[in-house]
């Protein structure tokens, strides 16, 4: 069975997405996608409503989430398509990550204050509706303040050619490792999530292996495959054609399901469009279903 899919999409329940689950489903239907997976950061708050919206619109919504993890002192993002949002194992992961992310976000805001860059935790919470934001979202909130545009220290972020990507530039300048507002990660270990994955109902898929913060190696994949990794996001907006070819080969070598996802968020990633990774095909969904652990 064929049909286009996008297996890595973020909603406004993700703290850095712009569109509600219902809006995403409607958008997917409008462009003819057969299936999407809403994979919010460390959250399953889009469910079960998103599944119901999908049934109404004729779009299969595959429950998912994107978990921020640590492995070999690097940050790795793990997708869990087909996750069962009602299971205790999922609650444990979400609770752990909520605490870790709030601590990290508060510390980032505090570091900005120490640098004389005015942003309060209350301002951040008001925009994110209580969800602990990632660093790029904090940067966006800060740069959206009218006072920021008038601050000569920040003038470079408001140049016309840089403004659409200003939150990412700000992140690299302030929140990246070694920068003045850097906060060390305290996320869950990737191998622990892989061990828990069967109990969540999800199929572990490593997101965007070519991302600069992951720097995934074949040795990583060999080890993680033994720990339960089932898929690799080969087709993604993070990868160049050369990287795509490389990871496609590694997926074959390590018997991992090659998946496709845009990592669509909205304004925070202005060049990334829903369904923009054309290789996404329903055959990937069927292959992932075959890798699901028995309940």
Image (cartoon, rainbow, N blue to C red):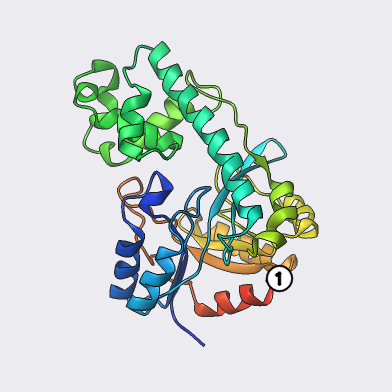
Give the camera-side residue of 249 and 284: 284
Where's residue 215, x and y in %? 63, 45
Residue at image point 67% right, 65% down? 251
Residue under circle 1? Answer: 295
Local SS, label 1: loop
Give the quarter of the figure containing the C terminus: bottom right
Q: Is residue 7 visible to us here?
A: yes
Residue at image point 28% right, 26% down? 156
Q: Is residue 36 above or below residue 228?
A: below
Q: Quadrant of residue 263?
A: bottom left
Q: Quadrant of residue 189?
A: top right
Residue at image point 39% right, 15% down? 113
Disc 1 crowd rating (10 Å Cα; few below 14, some 14-19, many 20+) is: few
Residue at image point 62% right, 37% down? 187
Q: Is residue 110 above or below residue 4?
A: above
Q: Is residue 202 left or right of residue 149?
A: right
Where's residue 129, x and y in %? 35, 40
Q: Is residue 192 left or right of residue 129?
A: right
Give the camera-side residue of 31 and 209: 31
Where's residue 171, x and y in %? 42, 31
Q: Is residue 213 visible to us here?
A: no
- Looking at the rendered structure, the number of numbered marks drawn on it comes to 1
Query: Which residue occupies the extreme bottom position in the image?
Result: 1
Where's residue 83, x and y in %? 58, 63
Q: Quadrant of residue 80?
A: bottom right
């Amino acid at each position: 069975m064929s049909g286009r899919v996008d297996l890595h999409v973020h909603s406004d329940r993700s703290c850095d997405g712009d569109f509600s689950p219902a809006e995403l489903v409607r958008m997917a239907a409008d462009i003819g996608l057969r299936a999407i997976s809403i994979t919010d950061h460390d959250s399953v708050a889009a469910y079960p409503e998103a599944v119901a919206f999908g049934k109404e619109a004729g779009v299969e919504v595959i429950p998912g989430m994107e978990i921020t993890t640590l492995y070999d002192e690097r940050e790795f993002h793990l997708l869990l398509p087909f996750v069962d949002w009602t299971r205790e194992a999922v609650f444990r992961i979400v609770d752990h990550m909520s605490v870790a992310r709030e601590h990290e976000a508060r510390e980032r805001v505090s570091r900005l204050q120490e640098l004389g860059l005015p942003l309060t935790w209350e301002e951040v919470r008001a925009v994110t509706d209580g969800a602990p934001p990632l660093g790029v979202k904090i940067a966006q909130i800060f740069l959206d303040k009218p006072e920021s545009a008038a601050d000569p220290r920040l003038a470079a972020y408001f140049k016309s050619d840089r403004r659409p990507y200003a939150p990412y530039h700000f992140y690299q300048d302030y929140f990246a490792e070694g920068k003045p507002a850097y906060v060390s990660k305290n996320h869950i270990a990737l191998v622990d999530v892989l061990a828990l994955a069967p109990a969540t109902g999800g199929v572990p898929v490593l997101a965007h292996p070519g991302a600069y913060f992951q720097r995934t190696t074949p040795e990583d994949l060999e080890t993680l495959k033994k720990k339960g990794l089932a898929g690799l996001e080969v087709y993604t907006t993070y990868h160049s054609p050369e990287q795509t070819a490389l990871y496609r080969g590694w997926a074959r070598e390590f018997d991992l399901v090659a998946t496709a996802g845009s990592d669509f968020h909205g304004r925070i990633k202005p060049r990334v469009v829903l369904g923009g990774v054309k290789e996404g095909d329903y055959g990937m969904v069927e292959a992932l279903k075959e890798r699901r652990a028995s309940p």
